[in-house]
Structure formats: C-alpha cells, structure tokens
C-alpha cells in the first residue's frame, strides 16, 4: 500500500502542554507588523559589518568549496527503503539519513515522515549557481516508495527545495506537509494544497484511514508538534523573518506505549527518569531540531579556539527553549540534531549549533538516542568538512557520554534502527 491507499484527517490538538508564557507569543512582531523574532538573550543578529569583512577575506571562487573536501572521503550508501506498508509487532523505529538535514523516519505504526527534503544538487534559487553538493545525492524522490508526512523546519534553501517538494507532491499526492507559520501560502501557490501550518507549541494529529476493508488494513495516527528553535528565515532580501522557523516532534499515537533502552546516563550517574509527561513520554517519538543556534558567544574574544573552554563554559546565555521542550514534551526516543556550519563562531553561533552545542541540546531535550545531521553535504561554514564528527566525539567524551551508540554520526544513505519496545 502507498499513501494513496489512505485518506488523511487532520485534527488540531487543543490545550497542548506549553510554557506558562507561551500565550504571550513573544516571538511575534508587535504593533501590527508581520514577522518573527528570537525572544531570548542567546540570540544576537549578525553584525552586517562583520559579515562584509568576513566575505571580503574569502576567495569567491572557493566560497562554496573547502580544501578538506578533496580528502574528506565521506561515504554515501544507496539507501534501502522498506516497501511494506505496515510493520509487525516489535517493528523498530527506523531513520535513514539522506544528507544534510533530510531524514526519512518510519514509525513503528508504519507512518513515514520525511524531514527537510532537498534532493537536488544545489541548495539555491537556481540550478546553476549556489552551494553544490560535495557528496553524492543518495537517491531521487521517485526511489522513495512511501511518504506520508513531510515536515519543514524553515524556508532557507538548504531545508526547503521547490523542485523537491513539487516532485514529492506529484509522486505522493496524498502526502501532507507540516510547516511553520507563514509558509502555507507558498506551498499552495506551488500547487500543494495538503499543508498545515503551526505556531510554536501547537500540535496536530494526522490519521491515515485505509480505503476499503481488509484484515491487513488499519488506521495510523501520529501527533506532529511545532516547537521553538533559534534561527531566521528568508528566501530573498524582502522576506527576512516573515515566516517562522521551528523544530518539530512527531509521536506515534497508534502503537502501544513503549520505550527503547536509554543508552546513557546523566552526568551525575543517574539514569534519566522514564516516567515523564503525557503520551509523548511513553510512545515512540522523534525530535527534529531543524536548523538552530544555541548560545551567544559575543563575549568570547576573537580567536578563542574553543568557546566552551573555561572560563566560557558557564555563564553565557543559552536558548531556554530546549530545556522547556525536554521538560514539557520529552523524553524522546530519537533526536535528529545539527552539528555543522558553525564557523566562524562569531557569526554563526546564534544560527547554527556546534557539536558541543548539539550535545547540550541533546541533554536538554531529553533524547534517549540521537543522530547527527547538517554536515557532510554542502559547504555552509568555514570548518573542515570532517571536523564536526571529530568534535562531536570530543564533546560526548567531555560530557561523560559514550562515543558510540548514544549520539552517532551515521553514513549518508544509512538506515539506523532503534528498539521500539
């Protein structure tokens, strides 16, 4: 069965758990203006003069390349997708990395979710200019047999591709798109009517009802939650921050409540509490951080090699939203967390998390396991393309977390399974 063998019903969830001040909508512009802001001290906008100075010192022909690319040897596998509509009892949670921030996730109930699909050679407004992949595209849209849900974190070109989403809608016309506030009209104008936009802390249930009858047919339900992130939006100079950016959680509401093995302990040696929250804390759930910064490092002197080294390992503003997400919506079976495009830190820290930032987000959101993303695909930062994985291992060691089997960096095209019971 494909997604065309089902009809989708969307229901907004009322009275969702949220912080006490969520109703104030501090991330919305005031005084009748349309747009959004990051409402935390951890956010500092890029200094235009610093950006100009940085670009002036770069070689334009190498703007989207890096000397380390020639030696990177980043492996790309041809993904193997399951064609079975339903799993069996004990079917694991499966996640396949398709490069950058794109993951295909299969919930135990059988629902397939595609996060931030950009299955093109370049991530730019045109096909002949802009950042070009330095690793092979693992697959084309037509090779993915089932897509039920598409989740978009924000509208930057490395996370939202017009050719890709149009092709998805063409081949999977019943697939439903979930987007942050301000993006639905763009999808409708692109000929994609199946779209639901949400604000931070809002949720919707999507149920796929099988057409016809049969012993092997059953409904599948997932809860899709729009959650905060620290970033920006814009697909042109006039659209900056006119639409929202977000992280997301998707919870399997069909399968019996169950938890995978946590696989790690907190820094004090005590295992994380498993009896937490309602629903999302006891069912297979995925947290997708999208594109996000975590920390303001403007107080760190230029040239400091590690902005987490003493005396900067404490006291700098961090984004409080991730702790709220972990407390109110966690724990999560799996986190998909960005680790790349973090250099130069003076410009990127508010926008993109470093590997150490990602480990802190992992802990704050209370993910049991995690997979890395936002690296190994396009040159979007100044760091060596192999550095994010090396620094992730160092950050895990520093935080007392095993370097294997908890927060891993997988191969592009690789499918990783996580026990659902």
Image: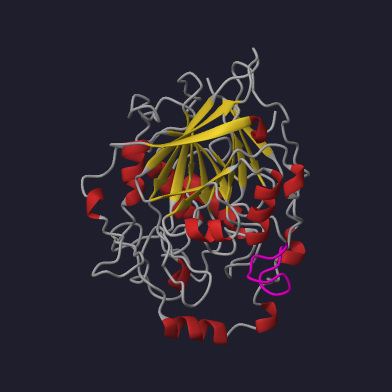
What x and y, as percent, mark residue 187?
55, 57
Report the colour scheme: secondary structure
What x and y, as percent, mark residue 202?
36, 44
> Compared to 311, does 218 lie above or below?
above
Rendered residue at 29%/66% (across/down): 29
Rendered residue at 32%/29% (across/down): 277
- Say whether residue 81 is left or right of residue 18: right
Q: Quadrant of residue 294?
A: bottom left
What x and y, as percent, mark residue 314?
31, 57
Residue at the extreme top of the image, as rendered = 215
Q: What residue span does the magenta drawing correspond to?
A: 121-133
Rendered residue at 40%/79% (across/down): 47
- Say whether residue 205 is left or right of residue 25: right
The one nearer the camera, 214 or 156, is 214
Tell me if residue 175 is in the magenta stretch. no
Q: Quadrant of residue 346?
A: bottom left
Q: Is residue 304 visible?
A: no
Looking at the magenta stretch, what is its main secondary structure?
Answer: loop
- Say whether residue 216 is left or right of residue 228: right
> Compared to 52, does 249 lie above or below?
above
Residue at the extreme front of the image, as rendered = 212
Tell me if residue 125 is in the magenta stretch. yes
> Compared to 171, does 9 lie above or below?
above
The one nearer the camera, 266 or 310, is 266
The mark total stands at 0
């Amino acid at each position: 069965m494909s997604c065309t063998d089902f009809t989708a019903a969307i229901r907004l969830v009322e009275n969702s758990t949220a912080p006490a001040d969520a109703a104030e909508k501090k991330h919305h512009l005031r005084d009748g203006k349309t747009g959004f802001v990051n409402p935390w001290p951890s956010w500092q906008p890029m200094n235009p003069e610093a950006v100009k100075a940085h670009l002036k010192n770069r070689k334009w022909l190498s703007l989207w390349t890096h000397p380390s690319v020639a030696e990177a040897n980043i492996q790309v596998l041809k993904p193997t997708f399951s064609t079975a509509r339903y799993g069996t009892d004990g079917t694991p949670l499966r996640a396949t990395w398709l490069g950058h921030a794109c993951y295909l996730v299969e919930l135990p109930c059988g629902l397939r979710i595609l996060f931030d699909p950009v299955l093109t050679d370049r991530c730019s407004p045109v096909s002949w200019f802009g950042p070009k992949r330095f690793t092979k595209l693992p697959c084309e849209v037509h090779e993915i047999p089932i897509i039920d849900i598409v989740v978009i974190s924000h509208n930057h070109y490395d996370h939202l591709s017009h050719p890709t989403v149009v092709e998805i809608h063409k081949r999977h016309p019943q697939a439903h798109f979930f987007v942050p506030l301000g993006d639905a009209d763009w999808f409708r104008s692109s000929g994609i009517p199946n779209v639901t936009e949400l604000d931070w802390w809002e949720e919707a249930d999507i149920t796929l009802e099988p057409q016809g009858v049969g012993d092997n047919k059953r409904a599948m339900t997932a809860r899709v939650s729009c959650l905060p992130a620290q970033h920006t939006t814009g697909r042109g100079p006039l659209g900056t921050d006119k639409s929202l950016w977000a992280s997301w959680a998707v919870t399997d509401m069909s399968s019996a409540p169950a938890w995978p093995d946590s696989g790690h302990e907190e820094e004090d040696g005590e295992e994380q509490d498993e009896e937490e929250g309602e629903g999302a804390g006891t069912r297979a759930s995925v947290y997708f951080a999208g594109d996000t910064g975590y920390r303001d490092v403007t107080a760190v002197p230029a040239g400091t090699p590690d902005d987490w080294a003493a005396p900067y390992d404490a006291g700098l503003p961090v984004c409080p939203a991730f702790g709220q997400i972990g407390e109110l919506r966690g724990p999560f079976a799996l986190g998909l967390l960005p680790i790349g495009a973090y250099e130069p830190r003076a410009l990127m820290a508010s926008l993109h998390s470093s590997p150490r930032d990602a480990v802190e987000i992992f802990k704050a959101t209370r993910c049991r396991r995690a997979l890395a993303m936002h690296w190994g695909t396009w040159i979007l930062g100044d760091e060596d393309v192999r550095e994010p994985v090396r620094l992730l291992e160092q950050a895990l060691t520093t935080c007392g977390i095993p370097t294997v089997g908890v927060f891993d960096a997988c191969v592009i095209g690789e499918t990783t399974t996580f026990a659902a019971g």
